[in-house]
Image: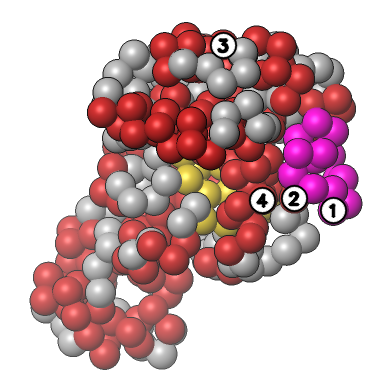
Amino acid sequence: MVTPSRIALARRRRGLTHVELSELVGVSAQSLSNYENGRQVPYEEVVERLAMALNFPTAFFYAKEADPITPQAVSFRARSKLRATHRNMALAASDLAVEFHDWLTARLGLPKPDLPTLGKPDPATAAAMVRSRWGLGVAPISNMIHLLEVHGVRVFSLAHEYQDVDAFSFYRGPVPFVFLNTSKTAERSRFDAAHELGHLILHFDERPVDRPQAEEEANAFARHFLMPAESVIAHMPKSPFVDQILRGKHIWKVSALGLTYQLHDLGMLSDWNYRKTCIELGKRGYKTAEPDGMDRETSQLLEKVFRALRAKAISPRQIARDLHIPVEMLSEFAFGLTMVAVQGGASEPQGPPPQLRLIRSN
């Protein structure tokens, strides 16, 4: 029996409207709507045409009912500027990534979520409290993705088809998820990861997270989490020159403009010097890029996951068959975070689930 929600999920993932898909499949847009709502059952031939048009295995449309993540459950960066089509594509991709995660948890022991519940402190206080709970002190964080993963946050990447989706996060039951656009600069992606941690900490009981102030709060959390005031004051002079800022940004692995904003927020740059510094950084190319950028952070968890699966002779193609998805989607979930080879492999032998252990990286 065809599963109606699977048709809707595949269509959203490919970014197609009912009208656009109807032209590819050769049925009316109304029929497609009826299929997705369970008011009409498509013939087997139509299902095959849907599979071809949407580039999903036919078996996908007969899998169990999907449990889609709603837009109200997700905190999107720059929600008001986000195209609805790209938002829906990203949400559909996250639905599939969650199914991949559920497949993994049935076979591997993943780190348990460890995000503190703090009440409603201001963002700077919340950042300091999380650092204290996690034993970070005020030292710079060497790898933001590793830090999230060791505390049970599942980090996945976003496809390049929706470049305007910077990052988003949500809870699925007790498990927090963060999705990052790895086509951004490494510094921007690192800040996005801290921003989404801010949403998970500050707005865990607030859905939808659509207040303009919520974005400002998550930004403030990210700045203070990555660049604690005590650390910045200890390392940077008052009213630093641009070259000092460019050297200083490597201490906290942040963008030049991000450090400049934090210096201004801490009163270490006057309004005039702040504007002057931003203009100078823009002339040097730091407004749209990071000319002397850091290496991209990668996922320690996903690397361990795929290594453990290879040890059990489980290939990406086997995983894709189990999930009824194109094998390329596994690479999409991990793009820029770790390498995923998609060829060959045997079926899974019997044995106890490996316990994955992550070493905290401050």
Q: Are marks 2 and 1 in contact (CB under 8 Å)?
A: yes
Task: Specify the principal SS of the magenta part.
Answer: loop
Q: Secondary structure at mark 4?
A: helix
For the point 66% across and 32% down, which residue is it? 267
Mark 4 crowdedness (10 Å alpha carbons): few <14, some 14-19, many ≥20: many
According to the picture, the residue beneath numbered tag 3 turns out to be 251
Mark 3 crowdedness (10 Å alpha carbons): few <14, some 14-19, many ≥20: some
Position of residue 251 measured from the top left corner of the image (x, y, whole percent): 56, 11
Indicate the amino acid at tag 4. Glu
Position of residue 126 measured from the top left corner of the image (x, y, whole percent): 80, 40
User: Marks 3/1: CA distance?
Assistant: 30 Å
User: Marks 4/3: CA distance?
Assistant: 24 Å
Q: Are marks 2 and 4 in contact (CB under 8 Å)?
A: yes
According to the picture, the residue beneath numbered tag 2 turns out to be 202
Q: Secondary structure at mark 2?
A: helix
Which of these two is toward me, 74 or 185? Answer: 185
For the point 75% across and 50% down, which residue is it? 202
Which of these two is toward me, 201 or 218? Answer: 218
In front of the other: label 2 or label 3? 3
Q: Are marks 4 and 1 in contact (CB under 8 Å)?
A: no
Position of residue 341 measured from the top left corner of the image (x, y, whole percent): 33, 21
Label located before the other in sequence (4 or 3): 4
In front of the other: label 2 or label 4? 4
The answer to whether residue 58 is seen in the rendering is no
Label located before the other in sequence (2 or 4): 2
Using residue 206 as the reference point, say whether residue 102 is left or right of it: left
Which quadrant: the N terminus?
A: bottom left
- Residue 217 shows which numbered tag? 4
Range of the magenta residues? 109-129
Indicate the amino acid at tag 1. Lys
User: Marks 2/1: CA distance?
Assistant: 7 Å
